[in-house]
Amino acid sequence: MLWAESAVAVGVIGALGVEALFVLDTPVASLWERRGVRTASAVALLGVAGGFAVLLGPIVVAAACWGLTTYFGILAVSLWYP
């Protein structure tokens, strides 16, 4: 399941879409500065992925893994090239 094209596409596009909300100077960027929002979003990601995984199966977990991988890739690049 991890290498399913749909899981890769949903995970990568989802992560890039969320990151675009922060880069494009939207209200979401100012919300992200709050510690509670960061914690709540991580818990929500795990909860939503877990809930959908029960309903739709492991493809959802694979998409969440790809989203997190994309996010950490972006983070690594941004730390490497400040």
Image: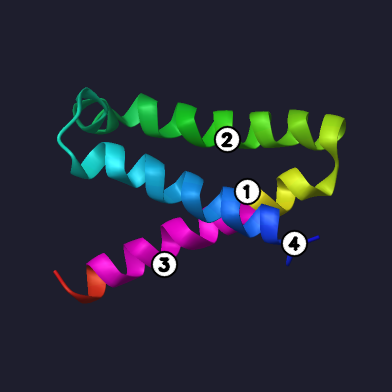
**Which residue has dot 2 on it?**
45
The CA distance from mark 3 to mark 2 is 18 Å
Rendering quarter of residue 79: bottom left
Q: Earlier in the sequence, mark 4 or mark 2?
A: 4
Q: Find the magenta span and give its range.
A: 64-78
Q: Is residue 47 above or below residue 61?
A: above
The CA distance from mark 4 to mark 2 is 20 Å
Please state the horizontal and vertical placement of residue 16, each as a whole percent of the image: 40, 50
Give the side of residue 24 with respect to residue 66, left or right.
left
Outermost residue toward the bottom? 80
Q: Earlier in the sequence, mark 2 or mark 1?
A: 2
Give the side of residue 55 with respect to residue 19, left or right.
right
Marks 3 and 2 in Cβ contact (< 8 Å)? no
**Which residue has dot 3 on it?**
73
Please state the horizontal and vertical placement of residue 49, each as a whole percent of the image: 68, 36
The CA distance from mark 2 to mark 1 is 8 Å
**Which residue has dot 1 on it?**
64
